[in-house]
Amino acid sequence: MPGRLHHLQNPLPGKTVEFLINGRKVAGREGDSLLTAILTNHKAVRQSEFGDGLRAGFCFMGACQDCWVELSDGSKVRACTTLLEEGTHVSLPELKL
Amino acid sequence: MRAAETLVKAGLRPVVLDEGFKAGGQIYRQPPVPDGREPEDLYGSEAEKACALHETFERIRPNIDYRPRTLVWNVIGDSVDYYDESADVAGRLQASHLILATGATDRTLPLPGWTLPGVYSLGGAQISLKAHHSLIGQEVVFVGTGPLLYLVSLQYAKAGADVKAVVETASWSNQLRHASGLAHLPSAAVRGVGFMLSLRRMGVPIYRGAHAIRFEGESDCGLTAVSFESGGRSHRLSCIAAAMGFGVRSEWQLAELAGAQLSWSDIQQQWVPDLTDHVRASVDGLYLAGDGAGVCGADAAEVRGELAGFALLQDLGHSVDASRRQVLEKSLKKQWRARAALDRMYPVPMHLLDELADDTLVCRCEAIAAGEIRHVLVRPGAEDVNRAKAFSRAGMGRCQGRMCALNVQAIVERAKEQGPQAIGWQRTQPPIKPVPMAAMADAYVPDPEGTRE
Ligand SMILES: Cc1cc2nc3c(=O)[nH]c(=O)nc-3n(C[C@H](O)[C@H](O)[C@H](O)COP(=O)(O)OP(=O)(O)OC[C@H]3O[C@@H](n4cnc5c(N)ncnc54)[C@H](O)[C@@H]3O)c2cc1C
Ligand code: FES
């Protein structure tokens, strides 16, 4: 599934970092925040708890708190201020997009 | 950083707590991992200043106790509560003197559809590009007001994004009417005109005096278009991404917790801490620098940092370089005058809230619509923003009102037909950002003297 964000080509090749979205293996880039890595592969990060639909982050700077995501172990992290790590497994809403 | 440098020069070893991954703050933010982009690619015309600041940091680093990824979440008297994200531990420091330079975040407005996936804050759009070299989308509409709007639009256009348009809420006549104020700082005017000309050269349309702005799309799919009115015509631009920002607002939550008095600033359309000597808060030993204490921009933030260092040194009985201080004060005065001109040229378009519909979400965290806030205001006792917050929960969510407090206030003002002084500000509650309960419980020491209540 195509994502929402678009990685630009870096002058340095950079390392690919593999992680998992709902059990599916996907690729991020070294230096990505977890939010960037998710959104270059997927279109949203969570369902609003209040039934008003999907959210996909907003401020990218740890201010709005709209990007909390669930990891497969049930813990939650703020994706925009978390650096992507190899093997991270996030549980995201399945989308019909 | 300039404050820390000033203290180091005087032989002190300050503790520097920063929630960021790397030194640099907002404008001089560094990518978490070097990706081969040059300072000119990252910071454009400000590259030299960025390098100078980063070099200063490297130079003083051995002489400061630097703690990155460390959030300060409360200040009580001289106790500073922090949470170190890398180690997942919380703790408390005692500080005889405290300099807060907490910066600013985007000023947002509750426009219809602003919570849709694909709508980002303007600063967020820039961080995506600067820190992670990625676009929020390949087709982007930029909505808002002020210099940062043009700067980020241009950065996106240069990076190869299809910038569909810049949608500016300030009218052209208003911008021209107040532009003479920039005579105090011609370089700012030149930069601003440069942004607009470059955008025009790249074929990016600029719509001015925009209103009736809506982000269109489905909540289970995301943004599909931005519609608005400008120049007497309706426009609708299809896009999958939009960025919006109406200037920035000061992050003074810690200052407030530390006891700083706030006052309403008509020109900034926000609450700002009271300052004497440019940097002293209303509490002894508390100094406020940078955009966190009223927005004056990046160059001024460096000056204010150095002045905060000087004030602190003076209070410790050190002698400070009086002529240097005079130079700084003069430069700062000029910058405040230029900032006032910018604030007049690009006012926060609070009038857009006059047409705010009952079903538009105001609080993103708790998904509270304007109508729900208006509804609680008829209850007895709902006289100020804090009651409105308690009754409606708007501003009680995870972001602690960062995104909505000023907008909730505006709704209360309109409903009660009273000004900011009567309505008040949403008081800050610690922790100012979410901190894991376990870490907080380990570190928590009740305030022995009860100084906060
Ligand atoms: C997203 C964004 C992008 C911007 N881009 C530009 C630009 O391109 N050009 C321009 O001229 N101006 C820009 N501005 C305005 C510019 O940021 C400021 O004028 C300038 O950065 C102010 O410097 P400062 O030191 O006051 O704050 P900042 O540079 O914001 O630094 C504040 C620092 O405090 C830290 N901090 C804040 N709260 C806490 C806490 N509770 N605990 C620990 N650490 C904390 C932050 O991590 C940060 O490092 C931008 C503003 C924003 C919000
Ligand atoms: S996107 Fe705003 S906190 Fe992460």
Image: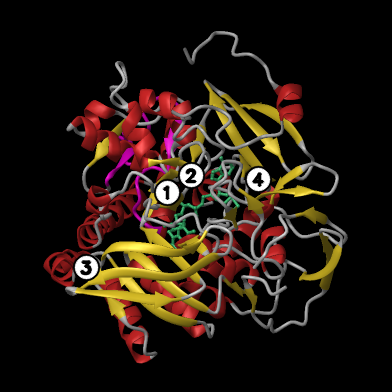
In primary-sequence order, the first of circles 1 and 4 is: 4
- Tell whether circle 1 marks a residue whose Cβ is less than 8 angstroms from ligand 1: yes
What kind of residue is marked 2? Ala
Mark 1 crowdedness (10 Å alpha carbons): few <14, some 14-19, many ≥20 = many
Task: Identify which residue, B320 or A2, lies in the foreground.
Answer: A2
> Are discs 1 and 3 both within one chain?
yes
- Tag 2 near tag 3, CB within 8 Å: no
Give the quadrant of residue A49: top right
- Tell whether circle 2 marks a residue whose Cβ is less than 8 angstroms from ligand 1: yes
User: To which chain does the residue with label 1 belong?
Assistant: B
Residue under label 1: B290
**Picture residue at 32% right of the left edge, 87% below the top:** B200
Position of B412 relative to B226 (above/below): above
Separation of marks 1 and 4 at Cα, in angstroms: 20 Å
Q: Position of residue B328 (x, y in %)?
A: 34, 53
SS category of the residue bearing label 2: loop
**Numbered-mark total:** 4
Residue under label 3: B209
Res. B190 visible in picture: yes
Q: Which span is picked out in magenta?
A: B269-297
